[in-house]
Image: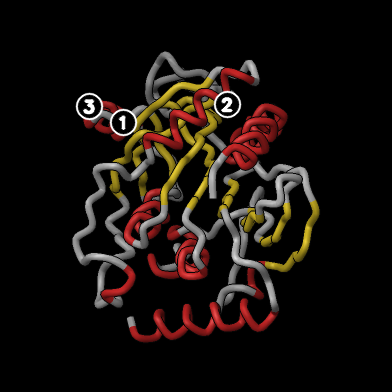
């Protein structure tokens, strides 16, 4: 744990030495969901220049960061792509950039992800704002001895997905003529897709969507007092929900490409609307 804390302290110092601004909002895009944001790109760097460990991407995750000044003057740390625990990263590495942004002073985290639909009413291409999650990854980024200044050892996760941000997001979606529901996300370890029996289990537990990201980042962010909003794109129906069709990663990326315009409009408008 001391190594993780030291690495983050060094990353904050390096950020400040470069003269990069403190971001107002941290945006993370999921599989196939990278978007072009309005505004001026102040700085761009590969993710490996920001984190103190070797990173390796997967298809659909560019793995770079941009500092963007929006037309409103607000500054966004845009993280194009994320690292996942199933790639061999530990929980602290998985949430490194989330913690870096929070320690710099950023207090808003907006994320997107591609998810499998567990609810038979969902269809590929549907947009869903998360209202809660199930952490089934057998990992937690709060394990170990963390600095007391970061937050309590046993943080309340009752409002993990901020109700105020979610209401703003629903309002913004309506104004854009976009349909977006709400649901519970089950975070699983991956990288294999779920079996039909596992899908039935997840539905019984109350999940509407399933994916392999997001929950560790939200736990770390909430521990540091960051308000969180997550938009899930239903990229496919989970095994046994949509018949016997095989699942593959290219299907996830194609769903992202098809929904890109709606996601881009929504995220762009949200970034303008979110306060501070």
**Front: mark 1 or 2:** 2
**Residue under circle 3?**
204
**Mark 2 and mark 3: span between their CA atoms?**
32 Å
SS at badge 2: helix
**Mark 3 and mark 1: span between their CA atoms?**
7 Å
SS at badge 3: helix
Compared across the picture, whether 154 is left or right of 129 comes to left
Residue 133 quadrant = top left
Q: Where is residue 174 in the image (x, y as percent from the top left)?
A: 57, 18
**Front: mark 3 or 1:** 1
**Front: mark 2 or 3:** 2
Q: Can you say whether 182 is above or below 191 in the image?
A: above
**Residue under circle 1?**
207
Q: Residue at x 42, y 14 (%)?
A: 121
Dot 1 or dot 2, earlier in sequence: 2
Q: Position of residue 197 (x, y in %)?
A: 28, 31
Q: Residue at x 33, y 70 (%)?
A: 150
Dot 2 or dot 3, earlier in sequence: 2
Q: Can you say whether 10 is above or below 159 in the image?
A: below
Compared across the picture, whether 267 is left or right of 232 comes to right
Q: Is residue 246 visible?
A: no
Residue neighbourhood size for the residue with mark 3, other residues' Cα within 10 Å, grouped as few (<14), some (14–19), many (≥20):
few
Q: Is residue 148 visible?
A: yes
Residue neighbourhood size for the residue with mark 1, other residues' Cα within 10 Å, grouped as few (<14), some (14–19), many (≥20):
many
**Residue under circle 2?**
172
């Amino acid at each position: 744990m001391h190594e993780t804390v030291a690495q983050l302290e060094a990353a904050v110092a390096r950020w400040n030495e470069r003269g990069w601004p403190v971001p107002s909002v941290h945006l993370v895009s999921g599989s196939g969901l990278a978007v072009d944001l309005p505004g001026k790109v102040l700085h761009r760097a590969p993710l490996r220049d920001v984190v103190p460990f070797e990173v390796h991407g997967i298809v659909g995750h560019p793995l770079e960061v941009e500092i963007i000044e929006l037309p409103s003057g607000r500054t966004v740390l845009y993280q194009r792509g994320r690292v996942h625990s199933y790639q061999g990263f530990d929980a602290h590495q998985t949430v490194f950039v989330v913690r870096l942004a929070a320690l710099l002073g950023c207090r808003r985290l907006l994320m997107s992800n591609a998810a499998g639909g567990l609810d038979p009413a969902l269809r590929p291409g549907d947009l869903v704002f998360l209202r809660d999650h199930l952490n089934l990854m057998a990992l937690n980024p709060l394990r170990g001895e963390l600095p007391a200044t970061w937050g309590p050892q046993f943080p309340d996760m009752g409002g993990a997905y901020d109700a105020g941000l979610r209401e703003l997001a629903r309002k913004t979606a309506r104004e854009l003529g976009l349909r977006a529901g709400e649901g519970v996300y089950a975070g699983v370890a991956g990288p294999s897709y779920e079996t039909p029996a596992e899908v039935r289990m997840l539905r019984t537990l109350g999940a509407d969507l399933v994916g392999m990201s997001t929950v560790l980042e939200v736990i770390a962010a909430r521990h540091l007092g960051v308000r969180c909003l997550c938009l899930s794109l239903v990229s496919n129906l989970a095994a046994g929900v949509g018949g016997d069709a095989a699942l593959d990663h290219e299907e996830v990326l194609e769903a992202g490409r098809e929904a890109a315009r709606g996601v881009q409009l929504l995220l762009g408008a949200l970034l303008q609307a979110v306060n501070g």
